[in-house]
Image (cartoon, grey):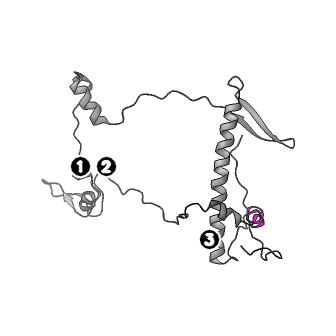
């Protein structure tokens, strides 16, 4: 079975809305996502509790249409792993297991700092004997590179305990319009608040 992919209209466009309406719709959408995510977690938990370990597969049919398969996955045991090599080396040495350790040359902590590496990038290095440039200005030393930056964007921080109030402002026809046609209703219905 495939992953569920929403079919949002290619005509999705909220440009006819005022900026405050777009922000309102974003907040309402986030509230729906949070609510549906929690509902999904609880439903999955209930289905997991109800499924028979000997019959770990079932299907979801809605009005005779097969829409999904459900499979109960049995968790596996974790594998032992080292999470702090230095602590493990110290323990091995303290407990007579020197043969299970080795000495490795690594850069000192200061040489791993971004500012130190950036400084090296700004310098030219040459072979001491021949004078041949081995690293020109602007090039990273071997084994170093520019890390990925973080993507820009917006973040939304909600006031405490606004979930119910936020859902109360939701106009379902606007959400359904965005999901199906890519647009919201242009005119509010009589007697209905605009947002």
Q: Residue at x 71, y 31 (%)?
A: 50
Q: Residue at x 78, y 72 (%)?
A: 185
| The residue stretch that appears in magenta | 171-187
The disc at residue 166 is none
CA gap between label 1 and label 2 equals: 15 Å
Q: Is residue 175 left or right of residue 34?
A: right
Q: Is residue 178 left or right of residue 160?
A: right
Is 180 magenta? The answer is: yes
Q: Residue at x 28, y 34 (%)?
A: 87
Q: Residues within 10 Å of mark 3 (few under 14, many from 20)?
A: few
CA gap between label 2 and label 3 equals: 45 Å
Residue that badge 2 annotates: 143
* Nearest to the observer: residue 136 or residue 179: 179
Q: Quadrant of the C terminus?
A: bottom right
Residue that badge 1 annotates: 109
Q: Secondary structure at mark 2?
A: loop
Residue that badge 3 annotates: 23
* Nearest to the observer: residue 185 or residue 159: 159
Which label's residue is closer to the chain start, 3 or 1?
Answer: 3
Which label's residue is closer to the chain start, 2 or 3?
Answer: 3
Is 142 magenta? The answer is: no
Whether 19 is drawn above or below 140: the answer is below
| Location of residue 141 by image quarter | bottom left
| Location of residue 80 by image quarter | top left
Across and down, in percent, residue 188 comes to: 79, 75
Which label's residue is closer to the chain start, 1 or 2?
Answer: 1
């Amino acid at each position: 079975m495939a992953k569920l992919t929403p079919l949002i209209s290619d005509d999705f466009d909220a440009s006819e809305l005022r900026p405050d309406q777009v922000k309102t719709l974003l907040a309402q959408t986030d509230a729906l996502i949070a609510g549906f995510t929690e509902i999904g977690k609880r439903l999955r938990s209930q289905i997991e509790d109800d499924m028979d370990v000997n019959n770990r597969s079932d299907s979801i049919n809605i009005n005779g249409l097969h829409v999904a398969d459900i499979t109960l996955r049995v968790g596996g045991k974790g594998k032992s792993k080292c999470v702090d090599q230095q602590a493990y080396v110290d323990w091995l040495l303290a407990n007579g297991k020197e043969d299970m350790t080795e000495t490795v040359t690594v850069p000192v902590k200061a040489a791993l700092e971004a500012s130190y590496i950036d400084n090296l990038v700004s310098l030219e290095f040459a072979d001491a004997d021949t004078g041949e440039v081995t690293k020109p200005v602007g090039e990273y030393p071997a084994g170093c590179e520019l890390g990925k930056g973080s993507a820009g964007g917006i973040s939304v921080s909600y006031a405490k305990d606004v979930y119910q109030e936020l859902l109360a402002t939701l106009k379902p026809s606007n959400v359904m319009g965005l999901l199906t046609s890519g647009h919201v209703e242009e005119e509010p219905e009589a007697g209905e608040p605009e947002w």
